[in-house]
Image (cartoon, coloured by chain):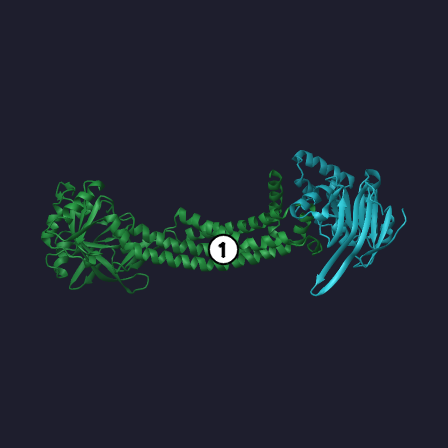
Chain colours: A cyan, B green
C-alpha cells in the first residue's frame, strides 16, 4: 500500500458502521486501497461483504464512519451537500446494475443529463452526447426510449451517460448483473476498451469471476475487510 | 446560478413529463383542489353579487334623509312639513317640475318565492313622481309607469324574476287593497330592482300612515354640494334628521350580510382547503415514492437537493394551478349570473341579486389553489431531497 502521488484513489483505514435499532453492523472495517491512474480494479466478495458500500464511499454517495477517501487529490470524506454533488458530477461516472435510465427520456436525453450540470453550450452538449453514444455503438438508437431498447442496449446507454462528462473515475456496480451472458460480455468488452484505449480508471463490483478477470487487478472483500489481492490480468 | 436554473429546469421538466405515469393520484389532487376553488369562488361570488346589488347602488350626488337616530328607512318617520323643508334645502337639484326630491314610504309585503313557494318579505316603496328624476338608472323595460292615485305598481326585474305573481298584468292583494302590475323596471342590477314601487299618496292611506313618510331621496347639484345640504338640514332647528349619501347608506345596509357571507365562505374554503392540502400532500408523497430511484439517480449524477425540492414544489403547484383554473372556470360557468334572493337582516326584506364571479375572485381562487399546492408539496419535497441516495438507488 503506497501513498504514491500518482494514485488516483487513496482509501485509508475506512470504516462504515450501520445501526439497525440497537444492533451495530460494521460493514467496512479499516479498508486501505489505492487505485492508480488508468487502472481497472474489480471488487469481489460474498453478498454483504461491503463491496457496494466501498464503491459508494469512493463515489461520494455515502459518508464514512471513520477513515479517509481521497480521489484525484480531493478529500471527499470531508465534503457534504452541494459541494459533494458538484464533485460527483465532475469526477465520477456511475454505471448501475439496473441501468437507472429515466424512462421518459430518449437515449440521447438520458446521456445528456450529466452535461446539464456542466457549463457546455447546447451545441457542445449535443456533440459530446453523439460521441458518447458512438463509443458505445448506439448512434442509431439515440432517439429510442429505454423501453424500446434491450437490456444490453440500456446498459450501453448507462455507460454512455457515465462517460459523457469524461469523468476521472468510472464506478460500476454489478454492470452485468442483470444481463444475459452475451450482453454481459459485450458490456465487459466495452468497459475493457474504455480502460485500455481511453485510459479510463474503473472500479467494478461484481459477483462474476469471469467479469473480474477482465480487470487488471481484483480485490476480495469479506466481512468488511480486504482479505487478499488478486493477480494482475 | 445559471447552471442551477438549468438543472432545476431539467429536473422539473422530468417531473412534469412523468406525470402521466402518476395520472390517478395526480387527478385526485386536481379534483380535490378544483372542488375547493369552486366552493371558494361560488360562496364569495354570493358576497360579490350582494355587494354589487347593495354597495354599488345609488350615486354620490344623491342623498337620503331620515329621522335622526334611524339606522334604516323602516325605523324612520318624517312629517309632511319636514319633507317640504328638505325638498327646498340648498343644494337640491331642480328640474322643470320642481326639486328633484321624492318623499317616500317603505313597507314590507309578503310575496311567495317562485323557487320554494314560501312567503318572503319584499319591499313595497311608495314614491313621488320625482323619484324617476332622482334615480336616473331606473329604466322601464316592460309596460308603463303607474298612474298617480291608482293601485298600480311597477316591479323591479329581480323581484319579478324571484317572486310569484309579480309579472306584468298580474294582481296581488296586500292588506285591504289589490295591486296590479303595470310595469317592469331595471336599475343596473342594484337593490332597487328588488323592490315594488307605487304611488306614495296611495300607499299612505292603504297602510294608515296619514301624511307621514319615512325618507326623502334628493338628487343634489353635484356630489360636492352634499356637505352644504347636510349642514343646512342638520342645523335647521325645525328638523331632527340624519343625512347620508345614498351610496354610503346602501353600503352600511349591506355590511352585516356581506360580512356573514364572506365569513362563512372563508371558513368553508379554509376547512375544505385543509382537506385538499392533505390530498396534495398524499399525492406528492406518492409521486416522490414512485420516483424514488429516479430522484436518487439524478442526485447520484450530481443534481442538487434544492433542484429536487423545487421540482416537487413546481409539480405540486402545477397540479394545484390546474385545479384552480378548472375550478374557476366551473364556478364561472355554473354560478355567474345565477339569480337568487336573500334576507337583508338590516331591512328585514329580501334582496334579489345575481352571483357575481369577478376577475379578482378568479385570481383569488387561483392564488388559493397555488398556496394549497405549495403547502401540500413542501414536506414531500423536503423528503425527496433528503432521500438517502444509496438506499434509494436500489428501490425498484
Left or right of B16? Residue B142 is: left
Residue B80 spot, x, y in % from top left: 10, 53
Locate the C terminus of chain B by quadrant: bottom right
Circle 1 packing at 10 Å, graded few (<14), some (14-19), many (20+), is many
> Would residue A83 be found to the left or right of residue A178 on screen?
left
Q: Secondary structure at mark 1?
A: helix
Residue A2 x %, y %: 84, 45
Relative to B260, residue B188 above or below: above
Name the residue carrying label 1: B33
Q: Residue at x 60, y 43 (%)?
A: B9
Residue under mark 1: which chain is it in? B
Q: Is residue B10 visible?
A: yes
Residue drawn 85% across and 51% down? A219
Residue B155 in the image: state x and y as whole percent.
23, 54
Closest to the observer, A18 or B56: A18
Q: Is residue B1 left or right of residue A169?
A: left
* Foreground of the two, B313 or A68: A68
- Nearer-the-camera pick, B227 or B319: B227
- Residue A228 or residue B341, whichever sits in front: A228
- Quadrant where the image shows the N terminus of chain B: top right
Question: How many discs mark residues in the rendered view?
Answer: 1
Q: Is residue A145 visible?
A: no
Amino acid at each position: 500500500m503506497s501513498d504514491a502521488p500518482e494514485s488516483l484513489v487513496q482509501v485509508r483505514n475506512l470504516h462504515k458502521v450501520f445501526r439497525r435499532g440497537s444492533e451495530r453492523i460494521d460493514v467496512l472495517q479499516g479498508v486501505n486501497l489505492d487505485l492508480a491512474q488508468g487502472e481497472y480494479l474489480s471488487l469481489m466478495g460474498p453478498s454483504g461483504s461491503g463491496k457496494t458500500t466501498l464503491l459508494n464511499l469512493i463515489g461520494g454517495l455515502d459518508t464514512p464512519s471513520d477513515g479517509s477517501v481521497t480521489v484525484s487529490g480531493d478529500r471527499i470524506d470531508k465534503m457534504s451537500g452541494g459541494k459533494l454533488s458538484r464533485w460527483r458530477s465532475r469526477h465520477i461516472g456511475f454505471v448501475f446494475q439496473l441501468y437507472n435510465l429515466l424512462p421518459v427520456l430518449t437515449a440521447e436525453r438520458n446521456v445528456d443529463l450529466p452535461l446539464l450540470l456542466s457549463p457546455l453550450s447546447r451545441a457542445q452538449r449535443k456533440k459530446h452526447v453523439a460521441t458518447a453514444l458512438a463509443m458505445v455503438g448506439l448512434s442509431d438508437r439515440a432517439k429510442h426510449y429505454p423501453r424500446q431498447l434491450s437490456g444490453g442496449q440500456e446498459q450501453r446507454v448507462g455507460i454512455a451517460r457515465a462517460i459523457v462528462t469524461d469523468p476521472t473515475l468510472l464506478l460500476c456496480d454489478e454492470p452485468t448483473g442483470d444481463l444475459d451472458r452475451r450482453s454481459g460480455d459485450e458490456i465487459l468488452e466495452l468497459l475493457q476498451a474504455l480502460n485500455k484505449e481511453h485510459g479510463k480508471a474503473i472500479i467494478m463490483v461484481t459477483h462474476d469471476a469471469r467479469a473480474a478477470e477482465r480487470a487488471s487487478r481484483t480485490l476480495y472483500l469479506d466481512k468488511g475487510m480486504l482479505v487478499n489481492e488478486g493477480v494482475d490480468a | 446560478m445559471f447552471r442551477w436554473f438549468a438543472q432545476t429546469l431539467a429536473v422539473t421538466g422530468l417531473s412534469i413529463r412523468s406525470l402521466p405515469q402518476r395520472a390517478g393520484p395526480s387527478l385526485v389532487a386536481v379534483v380535490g383542489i378544483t372542488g375547493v376553488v369552486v366552493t371558494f369562488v361560488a360562496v364569495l361570488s354570493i358576497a360579490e353579487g350582494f355587494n354589487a346589488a347593495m354597495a354599488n347602488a345609488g350615486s354620490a350626488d344623491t342623498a337620503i334623509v331620515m329621522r335622526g337616530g334611524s339606522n334604516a328607512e323602516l325605523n324612520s318617520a318624517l312629517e309632511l312639513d319636514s319633507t317640504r323643508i328638505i325638498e327646498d334645502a340648498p343644494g337640491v337639484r331642480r328640474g322643470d317640475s320642481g326639486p328633484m326630491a321624492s318623499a317616500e314610504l317603505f313597507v314590507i309585503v309578503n310575496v311567495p318565492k317562485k323557487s320554494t313557494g314560501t312567503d318572503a318579505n319584499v319591499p313595497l316603496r311608495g314614491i313621488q313622481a320625482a323619484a324617476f328624476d332622482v334615480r336616473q338608472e331606473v329604466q322601464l323595460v316592460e309596460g308603463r309607469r303607474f298612474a298617480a292615485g291608482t293601485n298600480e305598481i311597477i316591479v323591479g326585474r329581480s323581484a319579478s324574476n324571484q317572486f310569484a305573481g309579480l309579472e306584468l298584468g298580474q294582481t296581488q292583494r296586500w292588506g285591504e287593497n289589490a295591486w296590479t302590475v303595470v310595469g317592469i323596471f331595471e336599475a343596473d342590477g342594484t337593490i332597487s330592482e328588488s323592490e315594488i314601487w307605487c304611488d306614495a299618496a296611495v300607499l299612505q292611506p292603504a297602510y294608515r300612515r296619514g301624511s307621514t313618510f319615512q325618507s326623502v331621496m334628493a338628487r343634489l347639484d353635484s356630489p360636492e354640494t352634499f356637505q352644504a345640504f347636510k349642514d343646512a338640514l342638520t342645523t335647521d332647528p325645525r328638523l331632527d334628521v340624519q343625512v347620508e349619501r345614498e351610496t354610503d347608506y346602501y353600503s352600511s345596509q349591506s355590511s352585516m350580510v356581506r360580512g356573514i357571507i364572506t365569513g362563512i365562505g372563508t371558513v368553508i374554503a379554509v376547512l375544505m382547503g385543509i382537506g385538499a392540502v392533505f390530498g396534495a400532500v398524499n399525492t406528492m408523497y406518492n409521486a416522490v415514492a414512485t420516483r424514488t430511484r429516479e430522484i436518487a439517480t439524478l442526485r447520484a449524477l450530481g443534481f442538487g437537493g434544492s433542484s429536487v425540492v423545487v421540482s416537487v414544489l413546481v409539480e405540486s403547484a402545477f397540479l394545484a394551478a390546474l385545479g384552480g383554473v378548472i375550478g374557476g372556470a366551473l364556478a364561472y360557468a355554473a354560478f355567474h349570473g345565477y339569480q337568487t334572493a336573500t334576507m337583508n337582516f338590516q331591512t328585514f326584506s329580501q334582496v334579489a341579486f345575481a352571483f357575481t364571479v369577478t376577475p379578482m375572485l378568479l385570481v383569488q381562487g387561483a392564488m388559493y389553489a397555488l398556496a394549497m399546492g405549495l403547502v401540500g408539496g413542501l414536506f414531500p419535497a423536503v423528503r425527496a431531497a433528503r432521500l438517502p441516495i444509496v438506499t434509494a438507488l436500489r428501490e425498484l
